[in-house]
Image (tube, rainbow, N blue to C red):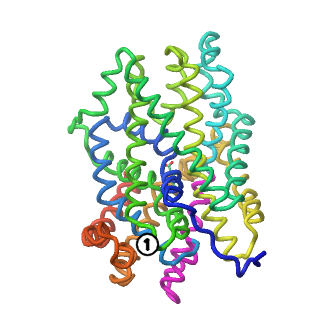
Amino acid sequence: MATKDTKKRDTFGSRFGVLVTMAGSAVGLGNLWRFPYLVGEYGGAAFILIYILCLLLLSMPVFLAEFIIGRRSGANAFRAYKKLAPGTRWSWAGALTVFIPLLITSYYCVVGGWSVNYFAESITFGFSRMATTGELSDFFNSSITAVWAPLVGHFIFLLVTAIVVAKGVKGGIENFSKLMMPLLFIIIIGIAVYGMTLEGSAAGVEYLLKPDFSKINISVVAAAMGQAFFTLSLGCGTIITYASYVKKSDSMLASSLGTSVSDFFFAIIAGFAIMPAVFAFGLNPGAGPGLIFDTLPHIFAQMPGGDLVAILFFFALLIAALTSSISMFEVGVAYLVEEKKMSRIKASVLLFAILWPLGILCSLSFGPLSDFKIFGNTIFDCFDKLSANILMPFGGLLVALFVGWYMKKSDVYDELTNCGTDRAGKLLFRTVYFLLRYVAPPAIVAIFITNLFL
Ligand code: PHE
């Protein structure tokens, strides 16, 4: 067997593998949990329109920029900057990039843990049972604020994440995504189609499709931009790391477009899976973060066949969350394997040991630690706001500046067009380069400032 030092770096096995793995990172709680409640809170179709603009002008160019850094360097997120900008301060950007996913994974896995528990509840038909005994209204609160149940869910979720990553890029991550992602799409499309057949669902469809421009204001724009970032897993090394496993011969543009488009459609379909049903049962679409955990179980308990829909929905949620947390976990493992020369298994165990206590703190911040506040925020909120609102946009800004202003234009061109052989890459190069230089950086600074001061 090859030694650790001479061992060849892993690569993804096929183009389909690249697509499902990247889409696996992008499609997650951001699509099924965050997007629907943001749409509900920020007024439906008008929010969706702004979100589409942000995706096109901001997130997609930054996604391509991360792809360029990752594939060109062929290294983990830390080394990527060092390799492309040797002897400069850019190595700090690499260090930050490896640190950010640690924060995100800590709280993300807590919500992942809730989905484990909700899935477990659904397979025992718990929601319809609780609806008849009148316990359903308390379930959301008790399953989140309790001490043990969320901790057990969190432990299971983090453990599965670590096991899949420990099994390797191709053998673990790619295979898992190849199996799960198509299933995920089929389930969510099925639920959306079913939701739209419910009586009274038309109001929900209209809500998603008919923009009310009077609802647009600066906080809607800031939320849409933040979400466009979060949903494509930007600014935190995941796309850099995954791209480093993509073969030089694969079309970067095809994989990036495939990922962004599937992520976008998944979010929209998730909206259609949820909103028509919410309207059909006369519930409030603006319920905030509790929308899928608090509101939906009430709907499942009442709709015909709701027990089965609940199982499928929470299974989908679980898979979506897992493939995303796997991608964040891989950033740290790739760093430990390549920089600290650890085996994948050792690196996964170490990362698990770091993330587990951090997740426990985030989870307890809904219950026993809810009075412990840092600048007025619970630990969970602190991790969430610090990473999603500040560090991820900052990481994305660094990526845009690095590729748009630091890297040689000809290198960027070579990478984006596969050395001038990719026709679509050639066609889009000028637009992408312009967006990276002149549009993304000021727009990201704008999100940054609005998020800080709003
Ligand atoms: N994109 C993921 C989602 O939508 C979240 C994520 C953020 C994943 C950052 C990896 C890195 O749920």
User: Image check: 40 left or right of 427?
Assistant: right
Asked if the stretch drawn in magenta spans residue 95, the answer is: yes
Residue 203 lies in what quarter of the image?
A: top left
Residue 220 lies in what quarter of the image?
A: top left
Q: Nearer the viewer, residue 404 or 265?
A: 265
Residue 43's spot in the image, x, y percent?
31, 35
Q: Residue at x 37, y 14 (%)?
A: 199
Q: Residue furthest left?
A: 213
In the image, residue 200 sits, relative to residue 105, either above or below, namely above
Q: Residue furthest bottom?
A: 87
The part of the chain drawn in magenta is 77-106
User: Image check: 14 left or right of 227?
Assistant: right
Check disc 1 and give the amino acid type.
Ile
Q: Which residue is mark 1?
A: 68
In the image, residue 353 sits, relative to residue 40, either above or below, namely below
Q: Residue at x 59, y 42 (%)?
A: 319
Q: Residue at x 51, y 46 (%)?
A: 28
Q: 10 Å neighbourhood of mark 1: few (<14), some, or many (≥20)?
A: many
Q: Is mark 1 within 8 Å of ligand 1?
A: no
User: Image check: 23 left or right of 147?
Assistant: left
SS state under label 1: helix
Q: Residue at x 38, y 25 (%)?
A: 276
Q: Nearer the viewer, residue 200 or 109?
A: 200
Residue 130's spot in the image, x, y percent?
63, 16
Residue 263's spot in the image, x, y percent?
42, 48
Residue 16's spot in the image, x, y percent?
50, 55
Quadrant the N terminus occupies: bottom right
Q: Main secondary structure of the magenta part?
A: helix
